[in-house]
Amino acid sequence: MRVFVTGGTGHSGSYIIPELIAAGHEVTGLARSDTSAAALSALGAKVRRGRLEDLDGLKEAAADSDGVIHVAHRQDLLPSGGIDAVAAAELPVIFAYGEALAGTGKPLVAAGSIGSAGTLGRPATEEDPALPSGDKYNGTLRARNAVERAVVDLAERGVRSSIVRLPTIAHSTTDRAGFLPGLIALAKEKGFAGYPGDGENLWGAVHIRDVASLFRLALEKGPAGKYWHASEDGGTPFREIAEAIGSRLDLPAASVPIDVLMLPGYFGMFTNLVTMDLPASSLITRQTLGWEPVQPKLLADLDNGHYFPVG
Ligand SMILES: NC(=O)c1ccc[n+]([C@@H]2O[C@H](COP(=O)([O-])OP(=O)(O)OC[C@H]3O[C@@H](n4cnc5c(N)ncnc54)[C@H](OP(=O)(O)O)[C@@H]3O)[C@@H](O)[C@H]2O)c1
C-alpha cells in the first residue's frame, strides 16, 4: 500500500514508518523542514514537503495515496491555547482528509486518547464512543473528542476510518516529551516520587513499538468507524509507577494527600492529570485485529534503566 504519514518524525511516527516499510508498504511522510525531511529519508520514507496548515496539500497527498496515517499535531499551539487549540487546529485537517477520501473506502487511521470515553466505573472498551463534550477531570479533553468523533464519522462517508486510542503513557527508549520523563524530573526536583492519595488510580501505558504495530494493523485490515485500544493491560496503579521511579532514583515514594493536591505544590502542571483513573480493555482490538503487545511493559521498561541515564 502507498501510505501517506504525518508526524513521521515524532515519537509514534518514527516507529510507525519503519513498521510499515518492514511490512512492505511504501511510505511518503510529510516534512515541514529540511531536518524533518532528512529524518524521514533516514527512516526509508519518501518525503512530501508541506505542513498541516496547508489543507489543499494534505488533500492532494491523501488523494495520491492508498491510505493515510495521521499522528502529527500542532503542539506549537499548546503554550498559548492549550490542548483545545491543538485539537481545534486538527479538525480542519480531518475534514480535508474526508473530502479527499470520501467514497473511496481507503483507510484513515488517526491518534486518539483512551480517556475520551470518560470515567465509566469500569474498564473502557472499544465500543465506548468518545464523549461529545468533556469529562469529569477537566474540560480540556472536549476538543480532542471532537477530532476522534470526526474521524470515526467519516466511515459514513465511505472512508475506512478509525482511531487508535493511546493511554496516558507511551514509553520507549526515545520518549523525551511524554509523562514519564516529566514525572521523573518532578521526583528529582522534589526529592521524592509523589503519588496522589493512596495511588490506587490506574494509568494506562503501552510501548510505542506496540502502538506502531496497531496502527499498521488498523490500516491494513481495520473495519470502518472503529476505536482501537493500544493499552498493554488494564492499567498500572499510579503508586507503583512512583515506586518504580523512586527506586531507580534512590528516592522515597510518598503520597501527596488529595486535599492538598490542588494547592500549588508537588504536581505542578500535572495536577489535573494525576488523579486520572482510566482502566481500559483492549480485548476487542486483540480479537479483531490480532494485535498482541510484545514489547516490555511499563514497569519492566522503567526497570530497564534507559529513562535514568547516569550523569
Ligand atoms: N494519552 C494520549 O492521549 C496520547 C498520548 C500520546 C500521544 N497522543 C497523541 O498521539 C499523536 C502523536 O503523538 P506523538 O507523541 O507521536 O507526537 P510528537 O512526538 O509530539 O510529534 C509531533 C509530530 O507532528 C509534526 N508536526 C507538528 N506541527 C506540524 C505542522 N505544523 N506541520 C506538519 N507537521 C507538524 C512534528 O513534525 P516536526 O518534526 O517537523 O516537528 C512531529 O512529527 C498526537 O496526536 C498526540 O496528541 C495522545
Image (cartoon, rainbow, N blue to C red):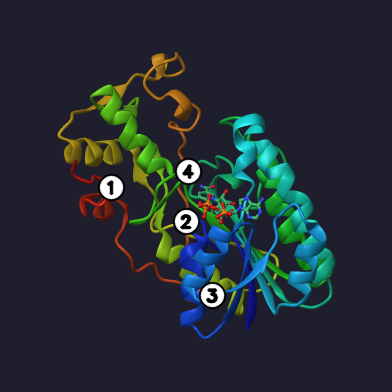
Label 3 environment density (alpha carbons within 10 Å; few <14, some 14–19, many ≥20): some
Residue at the (31%, 57%) spot, across then down = 297
Viewer-proximal residue among 109 and 48: 48
Residue at the (65%, 30%) spot, across then down = 80
Q: Is residue 200 visible?
A: no
- The answer to whether 160 is drawn above or below residue 238 in the figure is below
> Label 4 to label 3, Cα distance in Å?
24 Å
Number of the front mark, 1 or 3: 1
Q: Earlier in the sequence, mark 1 or mark 4?
A: 4
Label 1 environment density (alpha carbons within 10 Å; few <14, some 14–19, many ≥20): many
Disc 3, disc 2: CB below 8 Å? no
Q: Earlier in the sequence, mark 2 or mark 1?
A: 2
Can you identify the residue that label 4 sits on? 278
Considering the numbered disc 2 on the image, is that residue within a helix, a strand or a loop? loop
Task: Name the residue type under label 2.
Answer: His
Residue at the (73%, 42%) spot, across then down = 88
Q: Is residue 232 visible?
A: yes
Q: Earlier in the sequence, mark 3 or mark 2?
A: 2
Q: Label for residue 275?
A: none
Q: Earlier in the sequence, mark 1 or mark 3?
A: 3
> Label 3 to label 2, Cα distance in Å?
18 Å
Task: Name the residue type under label 4.
Answer: Leu
Q: Label for residue 11?
A: 2
Q: Earlier in the sequence, mark 2 or mark 4?
A: 2
Number of the front mark, 1 or 4: 1
> Label 2 to label 1, Cα distance in Å?
15 Å
Q: Label for residue 217?
A: 3
Can you identify the residue that label 1 sits on? 307
- The answer to whether 304 is drawn above or below residue 180 in the figure is below
Task: Name the residue type under label 3.
Answer: Leu
